[in-house]
Image (cartoon, rainbow, N blue to C red):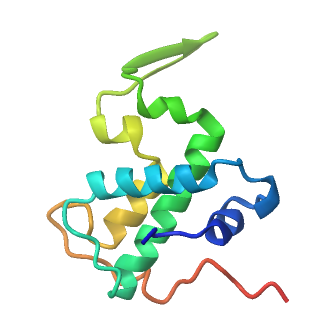
Amino acid sequence: MAYATIEDIGYYTGINEVDLPGDIDRLIDRADDVIDFYSKQPIDTDKELHATAAKKAVSAQIEYWLNVGEDVDAMEINQFSIGSFSMSNSNEQFKKLAPRAYRYLQQAGLMYTGKSAKSTLTSIDYRRDKS
């Protein structure tokens, strides 16, 4: 079972569901795989904290791919320059994992950092009533 639905992705990204890429189901599957790889423990979707973090992380990963391109997941870029702007990245997890996805997983204690999980995600549902 996927951590996020097409509706979740649409709401998170602010993109109407019909305007999402035609292969959104494939992107969700791939994002699930990325989140599973980077989380340092099984994601127990019976736990609200884990389920919410996984849903947000998948949504953030897809948003990241829509903005920078999915190919970033296959690239090994350590440094790049655009005009006078230069950026280097030596931290492997940030090369392929969206920064927001990392934060959601970290807050839920799904990225081992030596700290215990924060409970801030348990009561936060990013899908607000649209009425």
The answer to whether 109 appears left or right of 35 in the picture is left
Residue 9 screen position, x and y as percent:
63, 63
- The mark total stands at 0
Q: Quadrant of the N terminus?
A: bottom left
The residue lying toward the viewer, choosing from 99 and 86, is: 99
The residue lying toward the viewer, choosing from 123 and 46, is: 46
Q: Quadrant of residue 35?
A: bottom left
Residue 17 screen position, x and y as percent:
76, 63
> Measuring 45% from the left and 70% from the top, which residue is drawn there?
3
Depicted 49 relative to depicted 39: above or below: below
Depicted 87 relative to depicted 111: above or below: above
> Measuring 20% from the left and 60% from the top, which residue is drawn there?
40
Residue 55 screen position, x and y as percent:
48, 70
Depicted 73 relative to depicted 50: above or below: above
**The residue positioned farthest toward the top in the image shown:** 83
The residue lying toward the viewer, choosing from 83 and 68, is: 68
The answer to whether 75 appears left or right of 47 in the picture is right
Depicted 100 relative to depicted 68: above or below: below
Residue 45 screen position, x and y as percent:
35, 80
Q: Quadrant of the C terminus?
A: bottom right
> Measuring 22% from the left and 69% from the top, which residue is drawn there?
42
The residue lying toward the viewer, choosing from 62 and 113, is: 62
Q: Quadrant of residue 65?
A: top right
